[in-house]
Amino acid sequence: MKVAVVGYPNVGKSSLVNRLTQTREAVVHERPGITRDRKELSTEWNGRRLTLIDTGGVDLEDEDPLAVSIQDQAREAIADAEVALLVVDARAGVRPGDEEIAQILRGGELPVVVAARQVRGDAVWATLDGAPIVVRRRRRGLPALVCGLDPADVPAAPELGAVLRLALLASRRAAAWLDLEGTVVLRMDDPGASASVQLDPWSYEKLDPEDWEEIGRLLARSDAALTIGYTPGWVDDGDAERGELRVDGRPVERRPGGVHPSPLVDYRGRRAPSADCQAEFRAVADLCSRGVCTVEMHGYTHVHPELERWARAPTRHQKLGWYRELGPEVAGALRRKAASADPIARGLELFERHFGEPPSVLVCPGNACGPESLERAFALGLEAVAADGLAVRRGGDLAWLPGVRNAEPESHGSRCLGAMIPAVACFHDRALAQAGVDWLHGLLGRWRSAGAERFIDLRELTSALGLRLALDPGPEGWRLDAVRERGPALRRPFPVLVRAPDRLPAALDVVTPQGPLRLDAEPVAGGVSRVLLPAGV
């Protein structure tokens, strides 16, 4: 794979190439314009051969014949490459030359990595259509880079992942980071939701206890964990002809738009499917107690927040739009509701009453979440919001990770796995209810074929993201600090990758909230070792 290294004159392109290739082949000088002819240098990462094309500094406003020749050579390098590495000088800010080069790259089909050199202070390094995509901050006096990257927009995400690894390994600093390559988050939505009987085009019979038992066995055999997005509030349509509604074993007075606790509902359909949510709740709780599932809150009711309007609407059993609860399309309805009737707050109260603990994640119905719902969820103490992307707490900030999104293994999912970004395999209990539990077995197989190495749930991911990792020199060698900033403790062991400028020992001292540990450091490649943090950290 060929990588074209381009940028304005004298921003450090050749120095970066020398560092990545561990050579001094690229010409380095304080005077701009020293590199005139493009030079190709080879390097390797984890068995993948890469060719870095060092180009002369591109100043598109310079009409000197030599400068024009350099511009032409840079264009040829871009045309010959599969990935472009745009190097910018953070001290100088965005110059006209940077914008023009970026415009050329944006107009092509190459994936682009932005590298900002010579950084001081916090800054937005790069934007796309006005939104920051590369932001630099300081953590413990060291620079930290946050990239907003969606692999769906990158034609060659696996190759891009190789370039990101090279950039990391080129650093002279020690580093520690979560090993997320090959990770798939499993998420199943809609247990507890009344949409299974209220929305006619979507309706289906719920999974029975034997199905849930088989799901548990499959997850255990696969060493997999599953997030169940559970809807704690069941909405009554008031239509006794469609079915009989029992709550906690007793018939109840029908009230259109009324909400009952889903764990107590037994709906016996006449002109709609039945739903024994009591049996479903017991099965879900059993799988959670066995450690193969965690349950998170899938909205409050999965129905339009103005339940009275829904109950009066003649299309409530046919239109999907009536089953969107938190997205931008219902922002007006959410603003009109009193704080005491806020669906997220009411859902949390109902969820904790029956599951005995609050959820960590808000799993948004229909993967839709407006700004008001996002802010409300974090104000109420949730650690993450899962929609078409993932929002997590990071210190006092909200971090939006657009690349951690729902995916199919044959397309977007394989790009995630190759770009060191976890993919989310989101599906509904309806798929298993209609096709059988073997459908889930097939889904896991498709993901393994795409490169998946492990299956985790959303709580494991948010728990891992709540750790602050640092590899620091200690009195007897390198020490790994794993400090929990937010979120629940790890439920299962989680891998961390570490790299130091010198050779790492076979075991590392690890500082955790539970006390000091001594853990094995397994060599991986390129001077990187893997450490397995134990459950409880």
Image: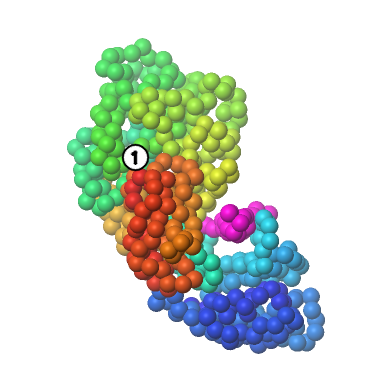
Circle 1 packing at 10 Å, graded few (<14), some (14-19), many (20+), is many
Task: Give the residues drawn in magenta, as a range.
Answer: 130-150
Q: Residue at x 25, y 35 (%)?
A: 286
Residue 476 spot, x, y in % from top left: 43, 63
- Residue 146 sits in quarter: bottom right
- Residue 395 sits in quarter: top right
Residue 141 spot, x, y in % from top left: 61, 56
Pointer 1 residue: 294
**Is residue 473 shown above or below 208?**
below
Query: Can residue 144 be found in the magenta stretch?
Result: yes
Q: Residue at x 52, y 80 (%)?
A: 21
Q: Residue at x 21, y 45 (%)?
A: 217
Q: Secondary structure at mark 1?
A: strand
Q: Residue at x 38, y 24 (%)?
A: 353
Q: Which is more toward the observer, 43 or 28?
A: 28
> Is residue 193 visible in the rendered structure shown here?
no
**Number of numbered callouts drawn:** 1
Residue 536 spot, x, y in % from top left: 35, 45
Q: Is residue 373 left or right of residue 320?
A: right
Residue 316 spot, x, y in % from top left: 45, 27
Q: Is residue 347 left or right of residue 286?
A: right
Query: Can residue 364 be found in the magenta stretch?
Result: no
Q: Main secondary structure of the magenta part?
A: strand
Q: Amino acid at mark 1?
A: Thr
